[in-house]
Amino acid sequence: MSNFNQYTMQDPRSQYPKAQGKSDDRQPEPGLDAILKPQADHGEESYCGANRLSGRKALITGGDSGIGRAVAIAFAREGAAVAINYLPSEEIDGQKTLNMIQQTGQKAIAIPGDITDEAFCKTLVQQTVEELGSIDILVNNAGKQQFVEELENLTTAQFTQTYATNVFAMFWITKAAVPYMPPGASIINTTSIQSYQPSPGLLDYASTKGAITAFTKSLAKMLIKKGIRVNAVAPGPVWTPLQQSGGQPDEKLQHFGGKVPIGRAGQPAEVAPAFVFLASQESSYITAEVIGVTGGAHLP
């Protein structure tokens, strides 16, 4: 990647090369950053922290790869202790992310498991609290996305699994975590441009993202009486294993992100700063909000 950090001024159109996915680079679900081609930038070399989250304790689902990895790196470099969750089959990515967090000197724990299991969601929260002491920041980021072109081919099993991963797990984890979250804590959910501009072929995924957006705004109004803020980040086309493991058809992979005004796909490292801002006290007057990181494919 380029020799820069997130403070270096440069032309956003050429800050990263255009991600050109190929059909022969496909990988099975769930995707792995370890075999993603071309590789994504999670801020491994570029993200510079400034103690904006010093002393905080964060739980991040889907923290092994993609946006979750970038957020975990950024949080740790901003001074937070971090717990990441991911599926057991993603252990290779999880361990790499864990090592990068540990290199910052911050406490880091990995809790593999399937968040579509309500009982595990409760265990995930309890183990995080036992290891870190509390949860000051909750990032509901894990997601399932599988492209299905025709309605008749979208199975009940896939529809249910997408909702269980993207919506039910968010509810279960949040409900379990809130009793441990102090005033000043922050919940950040990963929604999507698909919540506002849904694509054909992503019926189940797009509709879960619509649910996440509404969940975020309603929950924010429910929890502000506890001093807890709730916001969301809505990425546009960002280059992650989700795209290469069935999230996009072959023809879209080859020109992924090319239609947004900036003209290229985003990188996870470009999304993480929005999470840092919403987690920090700098956003103290912001709740029930969605920040778009979309390359110019703006939210309504």
Image (cartoon, rainbow, N blue to C red):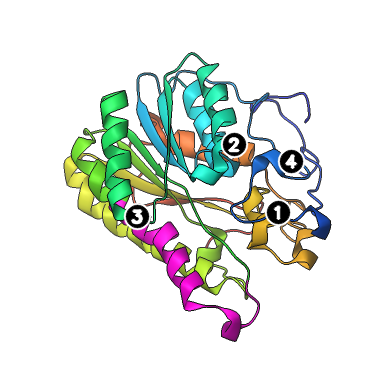
Query: Mark 3–mark 2 contact, CB under 8 Å?
Result: no
Residue at the spot of label 2: 93
Q: Which quadrant would residue 118 be assigned to in this image?
A: bottom left
Residue tagged by mark 3? 117
Query: Based on the displayed image, in which of its 4 quarters is residue 11 positioned?
Result: top right
Q: Position of residue 247 (x, y in %)?
A: 64, 61
Q: Position of residue 226 (x, y in %)?
A: 18, 42
- Above or below, 298 relative to 37: below
| Dot 4 alpha-carbon crowd within 10 angstroms: few under 14, some 14 to 19, many 20 or more | few
The disc labelled 2 sits on which kind of residue?
Asp
Residue 282 location, x and y as percent? 40, 31
Relative to 174, say whether 257 is above or below: below
**Which amino acid does the dot numbered 3 rest on?**
Asp
Q: Earlier in the sequence, mark 4 or mark 2?
A: 4
Q: Is residue 166 magenta?
A: yes
How far apart, in angstroms, are the residues tagged by discs 4 and 3? 41 Å
Which residue is at the front of the view, 87 or 5?
A: 87
Question: Do residues under tags 4 and 3 come within 8 Å of each other at their CB atoms?
Answer: no
Q: Amino acid at mark 4?
A: Pro
Q: What secondary structure is marked by label 2?
A: helix
Would residue 32 be found to the left or right of residue 217 on screen? right
Q: Secondary structure at mark 4?
A: loop
Who comes first in sequence, dot 3 or dot 2? 2
